[in-house]
Image (tube, rainbow, N blue to C red):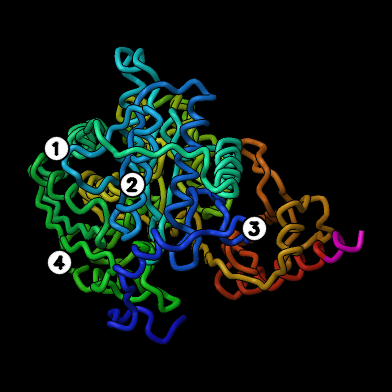
Amino acid sequence: MHERAGTPATASDLIDVEALVRAYYERKPDASVPAQRVAFGTSGHRGSALTSSFNEDHILAITQAIVEYRSAQGITGPLFIGADTHALSAPAQTTALDVLVANKVRVLADEFDDYVPTPALSHAILKWNNDPARRAEGEADGIVITPSHNPPQDGGFKYNPPHGGPADSDATSWIANRANELIAGGLADVRQAEPSGVETYDFRGEYVADLANIIDFDAIRSAGVKIGADPLGGASVSYWGAIRDAYDLDLTVVNERVDPAWAFMTLDWDGKIRMDPSSPSAMASVLEHAGDYDILTGNDADADRHGIVTPDGGLMNPNHYLAVAIEYLFAHRPNWRADAAIGKTLVSSSMIDRVADALGRRLWEVPVGFKWFVPGLVDGSVGFGGEESAGASFLRFDGTVWTTDKDGILLCLLASEIRAVTGRSPSELYRDLVDRFGDPAYERTDAAASAAQKAALGKLDGDAITATELAGEPITAKLSHAPGNGAAIGGVKVETADAWFAARPSGTEDVYKIYAESFKGPEHLAEVQAAAKAIVDAALTAARSS
């Protein structure tokens, strides 16, 4: 924890926005340098213009590659495009439009030149593709320009295909490889033109009007729930006022400032400015208002993450809120399929497992990445999909798809519905779960690892782990593939009756991440973490020598 974590940012913490944007246009990536190549993670390509990892050349190449990909896939409908409030997002959108227009792609940008949250773009794609008349004109897809909660100097660029969610690895690998070819070739095959003739779409109006089909606003209004919403300077800034006005709610937008340097933020755990609504340090200034509202919420820069603050519990741990949301939804959505599963990533809390078992619902456990929930949300076979990093979405009242990307606005509104319908805060309801199922201690830590060790961990098979015991308990499972869909974890997960750990290599640092949880308390969790490192290190040593 940085010594200034949770304290207000000072002038020395702020980026030079003009210099950052200038670097976007002036710096040219070297395709022979791995750190400067296009690389798609679970949420698109991310980087900074200052390190030559997110520059105009990257966006020219990625956009051209997307054009070629969608053509090869027979995607002939419109492409929705939107951007968040990061300084690099607006220039990146301009660059992308140059390429899309030159390639004669029909583009729909925001009608009011507003910022576009990730869930609003996913919603737009699905609304188009689920309308037979519109779909007859061709399937739609989209580009959302955001590095999510990342620091102000970062940029991000993500492709969402016709299913509306994050593209799968087959698509992103093809797009990244083609983009790197284009950069290495001096962008000779990239088409550019002035972005004229771009059509518009009312992302905000369409999204807000449709919320009545997924959130019980009558209950919230009747109960007089007093709501505070802090967009944290992100893309949801004008959405919250529109929601208040559309549904006549007692809702205050706590902070309406948009500043690409985020000078109003408090520093995150590591001393950086980061718009993470699940971080007590990043949310420190928001938490000062905890007693002023029945429900107080925060969102990150593209509003795909949520933070829930209650007067009696403060900022909720994301795992805790997911468990409460799941139990509430499956008891208050009678028109969902009787066999609709509960989706969770394998590094989310096992409290969710216990809730699912009590509900008599199938648990669908998948690798890290929201893309894995897409098929189930589309066909209604998964009622709720969530991950421990405060990202989730769920179905409409009628059991049909809402978004196939994370929706932080939706999960924030759900907290108010829960408060209105049950008369109790989500924090109170979580304490009920603890009384019934136990009180898990959960933490993520990092362990040093070389590039070779990370590569080995990513390919490690559960059978390579020879240990039979974890922190005094018999090991019941050693997984390298997710139980829900059989997809590779990109690491390992080891389970006992009361604890588990998962280890995955970091995509950006020379560490591997250890996620661990114990229902026997913090001391046992520490034992699990120590044992996890020893077990993984032994397996990596054995793999290297074999």
Task: Tell me the distance, in whole angstroms, between the alpha carbons under discs 2 and 4.
Answer: 38 Å
Q: Quadrant of residue 259?
A: bottom left
Q: Is residue 368 left or right of residue 147?
A: right
- Mark closest to the chain's N terminus, 2 or 1: 2
Q: Is residue 486 left or right of residue 69?
A: right
- Mark closest to the chain's N terminus, 3 or 4: 3
Residue that mark 1 sits on: 218
Residue 134 position, x and y percent, is: 30, 17
Task: Tell me the distance, in whole angstroms, between the alpha carbons under discs 3 and 1.
Answer: 58 Å
Residue 38 visible in rendering: yes
Q: Amino acid at mark 3?
A: Ser
Secondary structure, mark 4, is: helix
Q: Amino acid at mark 2?
A: Gln
**543 within the magenta span:** yes
Q: Which residues are magenta?
A: 541-546
Residue 365 visible in rendering: no
Residue 305 position, x and y percent, is: 36, 53
The residue carrying pointer 3 sits among few (fewer than 14), some (14 to 19) or many (20 or more) residues within 10 Å by Cα, namely: few
Disc 2 vs disc 3: Cβ atoms closer than 8 Å? no
- Mark closest to the chain's N terminus, 2 or 4: 2
Q: In front here: 466 or 446?
A: 446
Residue that mark 2 sits on: 93
Residue that mark 3 sits on: 32
**Who's the residue at 43% across and 37% down the image?**
191
Disc 3 vs disc 1: Cβ atoms closer than 8 Å? no
- 380 vs 448: above or below: above
The residue carrying pointer 1 sits among few (fewer than 14), some (14 to 19) or many (20 or more) residues within 10 Å by Cα, namely: some
- Mark closest to the chain's N terminus, 2 or 3: 3
Q: Which mark is residue 292?
A: 4
Residue 490 position, x and y percent, is: 67, 50
Secondary structure, mark 2, is: helix
